Image (cartoon, grey):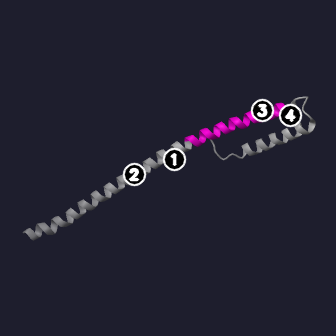
Amino acid sequence: MVGMVLRLGLPVLILLVGTAWFAWSSYRRATLAERSVIELTGETKALVQEVRALEKAVAAAEQGLRTLSSHPSVPRDVAVTADLTLADIRRLTERKELDT
């Protein structure tokens, strides 16, 4: 009788322990994945804010160069250089890969 209980109880006990271990390890992996996603989301938001700040700085620089190149007291070669720089800025900003 004791042998029969041991024979039936041991596999059930092993199954329960295995199931509990699998559930605990799955929970730990899910918790780690959730923390990683939260961290990456924070980093992504920070990068998007930095890109927006850089876009504003580029727009301000572009406006300054436009004003400089159109001012009558600026020599022609400086105005041409400013226009080339504007074209470079536009080309660089149009190739941006981050969509907001």
Question: Is any atom of residue 57 visible in this view?
Answer: yes
Q: How far apart are marks 2 and 4 (CA)?
A: 57 Å
Q: Quick one: label 2 or label 4, which is nearer the N terminus?
A: 2
Dots 2, 1 in contact, CB < 8 A: no
CA–CA distance in space, label 2 to label 1 = 15 Å
Give the residue at mark 1: 40
Magenta range is 45-68
What amino acid is labelled 2 in the image? Ala
C-beta proximity under 8 Å, tags 2 and 3: no
Against 43, residue 17 (above or below) is below
Q: Residue at x 36, y 53 (%)?
A: 28
Residue matched to label 4: 69
Q: Camera-side residue: 87 or 79? A: 79
Residue 8 sits inside the magenta stretch: no
Q: Which residue is drawn at 90% across and 32% down?
A: 74
What residue is pinned by disc 2? 30
Q: Write down the quadrant of residue 11 in the picture.
A: bottom left
- Residue 28 lies, with reference to residue 50, above or below; the image says below
- The amino acid on which the numbered mark 4 sits, given as a three-letter code, is Ser
Residue 58: x, y in percent? Answer: 72, 38
Q: Where is residue 40 in the image (x, y as percent from the top left)?
A: 51, 47
Disc nearest the viewer among 2 and 1: 1
Please give the residue where the numbered disc 3 appears in the rendered image.
Answer: 63
Residue under the point 65% across and 36% down: 53
Residue 75 point in image, percent of width and height: 92, 35
Q: Earlier in the sequence, mark 2 or mark 1?
A: 2
